[in-house]
Image (cartoon, rainbow, N blue to C red):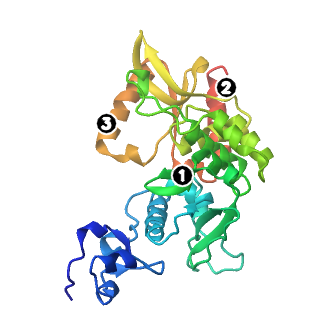
Amino acid sequence: MRHTNLPEELGPVFSVARARAHGVGRGRLSGADLGSTFRGARRRAEDAEPGPGDEPEAARERARVLRLAREYAQVMTSHAFFAGITSAVVQGIPLPPEHYWEPVAPDAPLTAPRKPRPLVVGVHAPRTPVRRPGIRGIRIGAELAPLATAEGLPVVAGPATWASLGSELSERDLVIAADHLIRIPRHPGGFKAPDRSAYATRDQLAAAIGVRRGAAKLRAALARARTGSSSPKESALRLILVDGGLPEPAQDHDVYDAGQWIATLDLACPELRIGIEYDGSGHRTQVQFEKDVRRLERLAEAGWTILRFTARDLRGAELAIVQRVARARTRLGG
């Protein structure tokens, strides 16, 4: 069945009220080419939930949450904002995949479908929290939830969002999130100026902790955060090694040979010429594979031993990672 075209100015998500103001009839708003998760809002079919594709799970889940947040924003009151886990997702603060979903009951069958977590929507006290299906409404003091805009959506500012997760995330996951926020971006070799500044400073994160729940855990996590990690997996790899009793490796380490820059390593033990690399999905392309081959050859010629790890290694094989690096250290005199 063919549908009449909707006004382009409505965009991919819109409220029923706005559509009606543009002359769209009620029958058209019930068309099969439109979806609706929240009463009073609509989304076009082309803005449907992304399929599995080849994206990492976290990227797919962020796209799904963003779609829902943009849809709900069409009917959200002007004083409400996205908070907690939802604010973190909108801002791209890395979270473990399980935090996108409701916890599974211990007695649930293995085939039970996962249920997405509701969007967290906040209001400043003393306003009444939002009550609506698919939404977890919270009330929070304005001093604990300064506001910002991300992806065109109202959110709790990054440092306060991070601090609000102290009671929900593990210390390691809080370190990974802090690494993302305070990272000082740098092009390999440092030959170009950074494209942006850090999302937050260490002092801003410290100030946001205050007397929140989980404050001790937040302070411990912040003490372990570093500015040189370029991805959550690199942060996780560093923490695995340190928690396994090994010396903390250098991050984002430039390697020179005869005065010429040849590579920047994710992690390194410079005194032993050991490089520790995390190879994500971006290394699967033919172009990147060929670059990696040449890069590894140059590092080997310069006397470096490179240990490479993947997502599979980081899933449940932490002891094996520590042992492999420890053996390399011993072999090379560390």
Nearest the viewer among 44 and 227 is 44
Q: Horizontal placement of 32 versus 257: left or right?
A: left
Single out the residue that lies furthest toward the top: 258
Q: Secondary structure under badge 2? A: helix
Q: Horizontal placement of 288 versus 1: left or right?
A: right
**Percent of width and height locating residue 1:** 21, 89
Q: Quadrant of residue 22?
A: bottom left
Label 1 neighbour load within 10 Å: few <14, some 14-19, many 20+: few
Residue ID for mark 2: 330
Which residue type does callout 3 highlight? Answer: Glu
Against 249, residue 55 (above or below) is below
Residue ID for mark 3: 290
Quadrant housing the C terminus: top right
Q: Quadrant of residue 179?
A: top right
Label 3 neighbour load within 10 Å: few <14, some 14-19, many 20+: few
Tag nearer the camera, 2 or 3: 3
Residue ID for mark 1: 312
Nearest the viewer among 141 and 55 is 141
